[in-house]
Image (tube, rainbow, N blue to C red):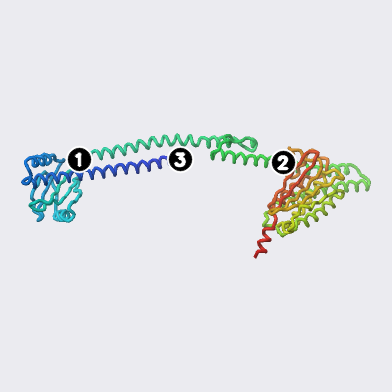
Amino acid sequence: MKIRNKLTLQFAGIFALILVLFSLVVYYFTSLYRQDDFYKRIEGRANDTAAHVLEADELSEQARRNNQIRYYRVLPNEIVRIYKTDGSLYFTDGEGRLDIGQDVLDRVKEQKIVQYEQNERQVVGMLYEDNEGDFVVLSSSVDAYSLRKLQHLKVILIVGFLGSMVVVLLAGWAFAKEALRPITRVVEEVEKISASDLHLRLSNAEGKDELSYLAQTFNNMLDRLELSFEMQSTFVSNASHELRTPLTAMIGELEVALMKPREADEYRRVLDSILEDARLLAELSNGLLQIAQASLDTSKIKLAHLRFDELLWLAHEQALKRQPGALYNIDFDRLPDDEDRLIVKGNEALLLIAIVNVLENAAKFSPRGEYIIVRLSADEREVMLQVADKGVGIAPHDLKHVFVPFFRANNVRNITGHGIGLPLAESIIKLHKGSISINSKVNEGTVVTIHLPQAYGLISAKNTF
């Protein structure tokens, strides 16, 4: 069922329930009021009849005349019976059937006044005290006029209910259509968005209501999808380029070498060149494998408590082996007094790869003789490593792609590399629930910052026990 139909039915159902309850309440209290009012009128008639019949010998002529006038103001289909306390009939008036049993007379004697219904008739029985003794007066009548009005009221309520439901259904349909118009617009706009149109965005995202919030959330998702598709396209393009280059070189050299017989030294030179290209392919393959391994779930990787400063020294030694001419200035001046704050929980081999890649990148893109500043610090929640160089820097439009595998900025194409180091480092840091960020300016340098949650809180909790 469509939401519009569901809203219309829900709206109509709620209104119908309210209208039915209102109609029942009106009908019930109107009927109750009519019944009570008519009982009072019948009781008055019983008093008038008893005064006219039983008090005639005790009153003046004027009083008897007044009682007579009130007595002749009869009600529709009125029947009056007066009984002595012994059950014998003393007076009767009116035509029709009124069944009076001894049980009714006994109830009147006991309760003084009794009200009940006999078919359509309403009956009032009362005990009347006179100088001649006690009498039981029973008066009854049919409230035909009020019953007809009550029946008309029932018809009016039913017809009004049906008519109101027709109006409510039409109004509910129009209301639901208008209320869902923004959602319909969102659906129409979403249907226009495809993989080739990820730049499109939903309108009506500037408001403060729930639909605007939905549009904002969807637009944010489209931003992430567009970036993801762009990164994927960049990855495929750069990976193809990086893998194709050594393969093309190897095929070209082999074809040239096989064009004619050559000297042994020439074959050796060709084989050495092909071996170098094969090693390059192996490095690229290993980089891809490491990125895949770094994307695994932490539950499949062995974790241990590690001193981050010691890990940094190991990474420093490995980076110097890869970049012998690099100059690293490691700053430990901001280390906390409590050495436990330098402890992180992670996989030593993977973290070592991430740090080495960051240090090696800084050396690779820095001028010879320039120091690379490496600062290690910690606060109450995390350990922070900052690596700052004064290299070529990264352009703003390239900065958002630095974590895409095989991506290389235009200003570093002439520097040897594969574009794997930073993407691999990011995957490893995220695997350890940390973060890595890059700030860079062209021809001024780059600052890479790594944040890792420390294990200090976990150690303190264990020591407490």
Considering depth in this image, is 142 or 251 the residue closer to the camera?
A: 142
Q: Earlier in the sequence, mark 1 or mark 3?
A: 3
Q: Earlier in the sequence, mark 2 or mark 3?
A: 3
Where is residue 422 shown, x and y percent of the image? 75, 47
Where is residue 255 shown, x and y percent of the image? 85, 42
Q: Residue at x 11, y 53 (%)?
A: 134
Residue at the disc numbered 1? 144
Q: Identify the secondary structure beneath mark 1.
A: helix
Mark 2: amino acid: Lys
Residue at the disc numbered 2? 400
Residue at the disc numbered 3? 7
Considering depth in this image, is 12 or 87 the residue closer to the camera?
A: 87
Calculate the distance from the C-alpha at mark 2 to the C-alpha at mark 3: 45 Å
Quadrant of residue 67 within the rendered picture? top left
Considering depth in this image, is 123 or 423 the residue closer to the camera?
A: 123
Q: Residue at x 67, y 59 (%)?
A: 458
